Image: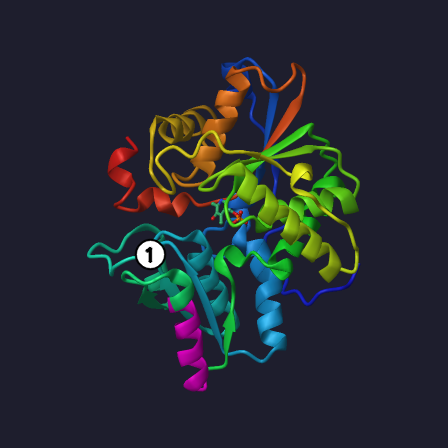
Amino acid sequence: MKSLARLHYAHLPTPIEPMPRITKALGGPDLWIKRDDQTGLALGGNKTRKLEFLVADAREKKARTLVTAGAAQSNHCRQTAAAAAKFGFDCILVLAGEPADQVSGNLFLDHILGAEIVWTRGETREHVLQNTYLDAQNEGRQPYLIPYGGSNPIGAAAYALAMRELKEQGAQPDWIVFPSSSGGTQAGMVLGARMFDLHAQILAISIDEKADDLKQRVAGLATETADFLDEPQEFQAEDILVNDEFLGGGYGVLSDLEREAISLFARYEGILLDPVYTGRAAGGMIKLIQAGYFTAGSTILFWHTGGAPALFADRYLPSLI
Ligand SMILES: *Cc1c(COP(=O)(O)O)cnc(C)c1O
């Protein structure tokens, strides 16, 4: 495998913990959790791993300003702002929508972390992101563009290596269940499973996209990431497991599915899920367990990808309790 520039600041390996009380409440299978909500860097999450490589690349390229995009409550943007602060970059975040009157949750943290915010106001995210990048370039700010979710081969490589970490921890789950959106986490996991010989079924709960589209993108990114790491491997859409039965009302639209999962994890294990990603993925996993999808006696590792700061967003908070 090619060796990559990396900044080592994440709190790794993240713990793997049993969840005996939820296991019992659901009547099996055996449930465990990998705590990537505890990766460090301003409240953690899966982007901390990706940013170890992305920010190292930005440094190598002599950039001075990190530019990325996301939703108003983006965890990726909050973590990018924190990484920028830690390594002395400016940070510009392109956030979807209109300037918010209430600044809460991740957006509040973006401000504390000193990020500059550009709102898309009616225009497409890609368009505003490109323009913001070009403006920064013209102003001599040496920008470095981090794609949505940090999901390019550099970011995805972090999750291939997270699978090596899992192997070194001695974990051999039958299933890994987690939320997938921009697909970098999943692409890295499926590649890492092949590279480091893990046999878990890697089942993504889609957050905002039809399974066929997400499978296609994840397969493409996994193949690209393999090339990037000099470990050529081909992935096809049919190699990728995605469940899209839990899209509900769309991205960030809360329903009983998320509320019940958040409440179960909080009250049975003292673990905080988030309303957008892990709440939906855990909710989907619970429904699948109840439907008998996983064979009796199997072990499931729920991979917690972070996001709890969004619990404190005024958009979600009132509908959570
Ligand atoms: C970004 C994010 C995800 C999705 O990861 P992708 O690599 O974009 O698929 C899942 N959970 C949380 C909490 C996130 O912030």
* Residue 309 in picture, x, y percent from top left: 38, 47
Tell me which amino acid carries mark 1.
Leu
x 58%, y 16%: residue:
28
- The quadrant the C terminus occupies is top left
* Residue 51 in picture, x, y percent from top left: 56, 60
Q: Is residue 219 left or right of residue 23?
A: right
Q: Is residue 135 left or right of residue 6?
A: left
- The quadrant the N terminus occupies is bottom right
Residue 252 forms part of the magenta stretch: no
Residue position marked by numbered label 1 in the rendering: 107
Magenta stretch in the rendered image: 128-140
In this view, the residue in front, 224 or 266, is 224
In this view, the residue in front, 186 or 84, is 186
Q: Is residue 10 left or right of residue 174?
A: left
Using the rendered image of the protein, determine whether residue 113 is visible from the camera's viewpoint: no
Q: From the viewer's perspective, is residue 319 above or below residue 120?
A: above
In this view, the residue in front, 14 or 233, is 233
* Residue 256 in picture, x, y percent from top left: 34, 26
Q: Quadrant of residue 272?
A: top left
